[in-house]
Image (spheres, rainbow, N blue to C red):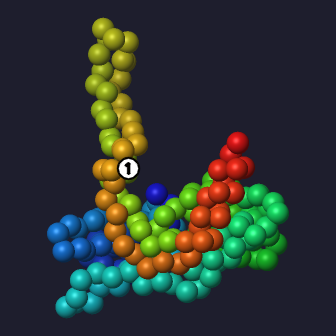
Amino acid sequence: RIFFYDVAENDNGPRSFFFYSKTTIFYFLSKYIYSPYQHKKPETECATLKINEREAAIVRLIFTMYAHGKGGIRMVTRMLEDKGHLTKTGKRLWRVGILKGMLSNHAYIGTMYFNKMETIKEYANPFYGIKATSTKLIPRDKSQWVGVKVPAIVSKEIFNKVQDKLAFNKK
């Protein structure tokens, strides 16, 4: 859910992008997205994603610092803050949760997944102790995910090294 997207203006406003494939149209709001891709759609062509090199350089720096550094995610956030790198929203402080989401995001190695979560509604039922209607997001099985190819920003070797380090630090 966390990417670095720099989105061009379109009919629905600057906070959204469209991704067109041959059979499917994905519409995704960018208020949850933080990604070094730019969406460009000429009038006569299908939509494409183009890498924003300035932001992609920061993403590569984050992956490299975490993969080859001796510390963890907090060390990476401190180094980014000390070097003066700003977040996508222009803030000086980097949040650990944002970096953790970035480091585990497969979009940076060339595959963006959709249909990862399922929405379940629980309707109010006083007989079973459910007092109000609510919705829950439940992760779907990986076989139901829809993968879309996007331009890769980070090599698979560095990404796999980061995943191994995240799994080791999780223990």
Q: Left or right of 129: which side holds 83? A: right
Front residue of 154/86: it is 154
Residue 128 in the image: x percent, y percent? Answer: 33, 11
SS label for mark 1:
helix
Residue 168 in the image: x percent, y percent? Answer: 70, 50
Q: Residue at x 69, y 73 (%)?
A: 64
Q: Badge 1 is on which residue?
A: 142
Front residue of 45/63: it is 63
Front residue of 96/111: it is 111
Q: Which residue is most to the left?
A: 23
Quadrant of res 44: bottom left
Residue 56 in the image: x percent, y percent? Answer: 57, 80
Q: Residue at x 31, y 27 (%)?
A: 122
Quadrant of res 103: bottom right
Residue 54 in the image: x percent, y percent? Answer: 59, 85
Quadrant of res 49: bottom left
Q: What crowding class fits label 1: few (fewer than 14 Cα within 10 Å), some (14-19), or many (20 or more)?
A: few
Residue 88, can we see it?
Answer: no
Q: Residue at x 40, y 75 (%)?
A: 150
Dot 1 amino acid type: Lys
Q: Left or right of 55: which side holds 113? A: left
- Up the image or down, 2 lies above or below 46; here it is above
- Up the image or down, 120 lies above or below 112; here it is above
Q: How many marks?
A: 1
Residue 22, can we see it?
Answer: yes
Tell me the quarter of the image containing the C terminus: top right
